[in-house]
Every structure is written in structure tokens, then in C-alpha cells.
Image (cartoon, grey):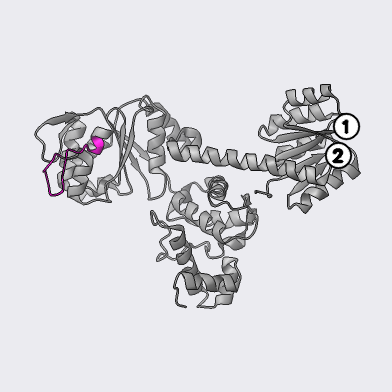
Amino acid sequence: MKKVWPILVVDDEEVMCESMAAWLREDGYRVDTASSGMKAVELAKTTDYAICFVDLKMPGMDGIETMMEIHRVRAEASIIIITAYATVDTAIQAMKEGAQEYIVKPCHPQEISMLVSRILKLKKLQSENVILRKKISRKYHYRDVITKNPKMEEILALTKEIASHRSTVLIRGESGTGKELIARAIHYSGERAEKTFVTVSCAALTETLLESELFGHEKGSFTGAAGQTKGKFELADGGTIFLDEIGDISPKLQADLLRVLQERRFYRVGGTEEVSVDVRVIAATNKNLPEEVQQGRFRDDLYYRLNVIEIHLPALRERREDIPLLAEHFVEKIASELGKDISGISADALKVLIGYDWPGNVRELENVIERAMVTSHSDTLEAEDFTWLNQRGIPQQQNWDVPDVSLGELERRAIIAVLERKKGNVKEAAASLGIDRSTLYDKLKRYEIVH
């Protein structure tokens, strides 16, 4: 249960207001109070309240008006109307105008506790369902690219313009900048949105395996080829194929890919029948392809075929104004995934993150937030949760930009890094990690770390 979600109590009777707030605080919730509807609306403008208890009868702005004004600024807030004058008409009016619940004074602490617990459980499920739906669909739209950076906004405007065209796109940028995210935004915002989006990591496979992966193979074309298999180009027919790390493919595959881009046709490995496809190609690389062309490592004709529309993503250090937005997003996302009662990140912690250069970019930021949340014992991430991440950055040997690293391995590396920095002092390392010494000793034993 996320007891860190804030609650607002609004009542012009001070005793009633403070009593209810005290009950909720005893349950571990953060609670603010307001003695008038006007004050409540002002508080709601600056704080995203999960639940608002609002007295129906108040001088000036009454409970119904207050509820409606709060909903204008916080549409997701759950409003509970409280009154000492319960009638069917007032209940109907409250529910009609958007109240989630209607309770009658005198209120009982147990009733309030059960009501809040039920509402927050529902909110947690709703939040988890939103994240789960995104995971299942993997459909990224412009609103999912979190930014207020002018350069990124220009890129998003460009991707919107080109979304429905078939022109090949080359996305350049450092590792972890979100090249696949932009590729998905292009695909799912255009006319091919209902068709398949296929991703291929060109650096992950040998030349032979990558050739089969891209173009498929016929039965008996090599040892173990028990039947005909379609390649990723065929699977993406009508849709989009995203060729990640295109700068790492071999000269032979560069020639094969050039033919596909020119003619939209190819042969499966070991095949004699030509296969035609209608596929949009989006390629990505963290290499300087013009330099690779000059050095003779990449075909110039293929480069020009790929580079019909070029998008260059800025590094995270070049868009520092996005770090707070991304950090808050990752806190919400990871808290749901891990079941952690962490709802935000402090201003001091954000200063630490903004001051770091992020060689691994957005992917590294997500890993760092997750590592901090695993070891944090507070309901908010503080600067102390990032003491191992100084403003000059993580030592290079601690490669936080490792793809597919398990959470356990991430934690093991973090512990090793802190122990090295503290010269093996377990007490200081535990303090830096935000855990007690006994917990750290348990982790040293579990991960078989010798110190």
C-alpha cells in the first residue's frame, strides 16, 4: 500500500478537521488540512492529492463547489464528501457531480482507515494496469517521449511529419539515448501502426546467424535447418523493421541490405525463389557513419540509402532539463514494478542527478534510479541514496549501461563499487548504501563478495 500518497482533509470545523487528519497520520499517511474550499483548491494546485475528504456544508465555497474546483486541477483525485446532514438528495447530488464516496458524521477511525485502504488499493491497481498495458503493447507515442527540451521537441515534430511515409530513417545517437523509442513512435504514429514492428540487434549475432535472422532460410541450407524459416524482413512485411546498431554489420551483409533497400526483394539463405516485401526500414547507430565510410568500413552507397531522413538524438547531458521529468517517471514506474512505497525524489537528490554527466544516458538514469530504490528505506529518494554516484560519475569499470543485467547483478556491482570507494570499511559502506551493517553482511554472503 502506498501510504506516501498525500491526502487532504477540508472542513471549517477545526476539531473535526484535525481529528480526522490525526487518525490518518496514525495510519502512516501524509495529510494536509484546509479550513475552507478556497484554501483546499490552492493546495490542490501544488500537490497531487490521491484522496480529498471534503465537508459538504462550509461558508463561502461549499463542498460540492470545492469538489468540482479540485477536479478541474486534479481530475484523478478521489473526493469523499462528509456531512452531518445526510439526505438522499444530497447523496445523489454529490455522486452526480463526481464524488467517489459519501460518509456521515460522526466519522469512525476504523471506517476511515478501511475506506482509504480500499481506494488506494484500487488506485495502485489502476496504475499497475496502465504500466502493464504499455509493456504488453510496447506502443510508444509522442506523449510517451518525456521531454521539454527544444531540440527533442523539434525531433518529435519531424517524426510526426514523416510517420506515414515509407522513406528510410537513420537515427544516430549515443547508447541509451532512446533510439528505439523514437523508432517505435514513428511506426505507431503512422499508417503502418496496425502492422508489425520488428527489432533486430545487428551487433548481437555473427554474420551467418544475422543473415538467417534477417532473410530467413530454406530447409537443409545449413546444419540444423530442419525446415523453412521466415526472416525478420518477411515478418515485418507491411510494417517496420528496426535495424539497431547498423554500423556493426559485415561487408557482405551491407551488400545484401543495399539490394533489399533498392529493390525490396531478397533470397532466403539457401533459397532460389525471390521474396518481395513492403517494409519500412529504420536504422540506428551510435557510430559516426560518415567517418566509417571514410575509413572504408561502411559502404558509401548503403549509407546514402539509409540516410534519406536523419535524426540525431542529443545525449542526456545536453538536455539536463529533462532529468527531473525522467527521474520522476522512473520512480513511479519502478515503484510499481518492485512494490516499493516510494513516491518521489527530493530536490537535493535531483541536484545530484542533474550534476552528473550520464555517459550511459537515459538507460543509465533508469538503472541508477532502480538501484537507489532497491536500497532506500524512505518514502522519498534523497541525495543520500545517490552518494555512490558523485557528480563526476561512476568509475568507468562499473559499466551501468550493461543491457539485460539482472537486478541482483546490479546490486552486487553497486556493493562492490561502494566497498572499493570506502576501502573495505563495512560500516561506512553500509551507511553509504542506506542499509545497516547486518543487512550488508547478509548481501556480502549472498553474492559471495570477498572484502
Residue reaching furthest to the left: 272
Q: Identify the residue shown where x is 68% and y is 46%.
A: 5
Give x and y (percent) for residue 260. 19, 34
Three-letter code for the amino acid on which mark 2 is drawn: Ser
Q: Identify the residue shown where x is 18% and y is 37%.
A: 258
Q: Identify the residue shown where x is 44% and y is 66%.
A: 395
Relative horizontal placement of residue 258, taking residue 135 as reference (left or right): left
| Dominant secondary structure, magenta | loop
Q: Identify the residue shown where x is 84% and y is 40%.
A: 107
> Residue 89 is drawn in which quadrant?
top right
Give x and y (percent) for residue 242. 31, 39
Q: Secondary structure at mark 2?
A: loop
Q: Secondary structure at mark 1?
A: loop
Residue 250 visible, this orientation: no
Residue picked out by circle 2: 35
Q: Is residue 223 magenta?
A: yes
From the viewer's perspective, is residue 434 above or below residue 315? below
Which residues make up the magenta segment?
A: 218-233
* Tally of numbered discs: 2
Give x and y (percent) for residue 382. 62, 58
Three-letter code for the amino acid on which mark 1 is drawn: Met
Residue 212 versus residue 308: which sits nearer the camera? Answer: 212
Residue picked out by circle 1: 58
Relative horizontal placement of residue 350, taking residue 251 as reference (left or right): right
Estimate how packed mark 2 is, as few (under 14), some (14 to 19) or many (20 or more) residues with alpha carbons within 10 Å.
some
